[in-house]
Image (cartoon, rainbow, N blue to C red):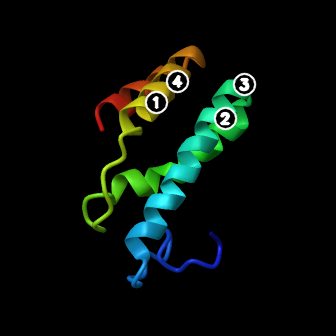
Amino acid sequence: MIVLESLPPMNCDTPNAQDERNIAREVYEYAVYYANNSGDKNEFQRYISCLRPYYATSTGTGTTESSNKSLISGLKLLYLLVENRLCDFHCEVNL
């Protein structure tokens, strides 16, 4: 995924950009699920951060909306509550 210029942060338009972005997003979503199931909080935060550009730019780049977006967002909100990061929780709810 490192050599693909269609992925964030470059977001260049290539012939396969939409497919590459969808695949990369799915990889990060599965990584979030794995980190959650293994209980690794640092990995969970890292992969959530990696997903942010894909969710923020999904409408403008022509990529399809992920069916997992609401589940991932719910996991993130629950994580923020469990970690007692209430300010971050409220900021995330308002997005």
Name the amino acid, label 2.
Tyr
Q: CA distance from mark 3 to mark 2?
A: 8 Å
**Residue 16 pos. (x, y %):** 43, 78
C-beta proximity under 8 Å, tags 3 and 4: no
Q: Residues within 10 Å of mark 4 (few under 14, many from 20)?
A: some
Residue for badge 4: 80
C-beta proximity under 8 Å, tags 1 and 2: no
Q: Secondary structure at mark 3?
A: loop
For residue 36, which quarter of the picture?
Answer: top right
Which callout, 1 or 4, points at the residue further toward the start of the chain? 4
Residue at 57% across / 77% down in the picture? 4
Name the amino acid, label 4.
Leu
Vertical order, 44 against 52 (above or below): above
Residue for badge 2: 34
Residue at 37% across / 25% down in the picture? 90
> Is 58 placed left or right of 33 in the picture?
left
**Residue 91 pos. (x, y %):** 37, 32
Q: Which mark is in front, 1 or 4?
A: 4
Residue at 43% across / 68% down in the picture? 19
Q: CA distance from mark 1 to mark 2?
A: 23 Å
Name the amino acid, label 3.
Gly
Q: Which mark is in front, 3 or 1?
A: 3
Q: Residues within 10 Å of mark 1 (few under 14, many from 20)?
A: few
Q: CA distance from mark 2 to mark 4?
A: 18 Å
Which callout, 3 or 4, points at the residue further toward the start of the chain? 3
Vertical order, 51 against 95 (above or below): below
Which callout, 1 or 2, points at the residue further toward the start of the chain? 2
Q: Which mark is in front, 3 or 2?
A: 2
Q: CA distance from mark 3 to mark 4?
A: 14 Å
**Residue 95 pos. (x, y %):** 30, 38
Residue for badge 3: 39
